[in-house]
Image (spheres, coloured by chain):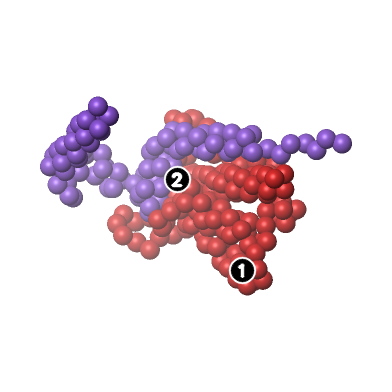
Chain colours: A red, B purple
Amino acid sequence: MMSKIVRTMASLLIPFVLIYGLYIIMHGHLTPGGGFQGGAVFASGIALLVVAFGSDNIHKILREHHLSILESSGALIFIGLAFGGLATVFFYNFLVGSPIFGHIPPTGPNPGDIWTGGVIPFMNIAVGLKVLAGLSAILLVMALATTVMEVEE
Amino acid sequence: MRKFAMIASLSVFIALLIAAALLIHPFGYPPSEMDDYIIENTQSETGANNAVTAVVFDYRGFDTLGEATILFTAVTSVVMLFRRKKREK
């Protein structure tokens, strides 16, 4: 637990950091970034929370097993989407041309349409879930382990 | 002896770096035709504006599956290493 200044600034900044991470995940098929990068940004927001409020306080609302359920579901969605294109090949983009995320943008530079990309946005969301849950779990578990060591010493 | 080995390995490394800098292909002329194919056909084949994401999640999906597996293994091993002992009562 840090001082009151740090806690106030952290609670002001946290929504922006988390929303920026989710934005990078959602717009992975339009702008630079994607699931891995957005998940890392989101996990850095969790790191700010852990540093500012102390890992024990965070552990009251965010448990490791919740995060590991989230991570496993992300992995399963990813592999399931990969199997979804199995009619042609593994990892085939079967949603291009369909009404769901199926628009094809004009070739060349264009501002982009979020309703494009076929299966790529879903895979971005799955990998983003996986990365944000995985990195947050690593951070939380390590922070908890250090506090336990301090108490034992 | 140790110093000699260090100097020898360092000089070999520097020679390799200089050779790589001299032999690198010119900027803007990729060595294979696959790059041009991906740049030209990404938008019509996958519908994504971001060619990098299209390569990562569509053309090279298996590679991403491997990365995700590595992350999963790392998280599992860290949680296993740092797990809390159950309090004995």
User: At label 1, which amino acid type do we have?
Assistant: Val
Residue denoted by label 1: A6
Q: Position of residue B28 (x, y in %)?
A: 18, 50
> In which quadrant of the rendered view does residue A107 lie?
bottom left
Residue A71 seen: yes
Chain where mark 2 sits: A
Query: In the figure, is residue A92 to the left or right of A151?
Result: left
Secondary element at image label 1: helix
- Labels 2, 1: front one: 1
Mark 2–mark 1 distance (CA, rounded to whole Å): 47 Å
Nearer to me, B62 or A137: A137
Placement of B32 over or under A15, stated as above or below:
above
Q: Earlier in the sequence, mark 2 or mark 1?
A: 1
Residue ID at (67%, 57%): A54
Q: Nearer the viewer, residue A92 or A12?
A: A12
Quadrant into which the N terminus of chain B falls: top left
Q: Look at mark 2 in the image and give the residue it sits on.
A: A96
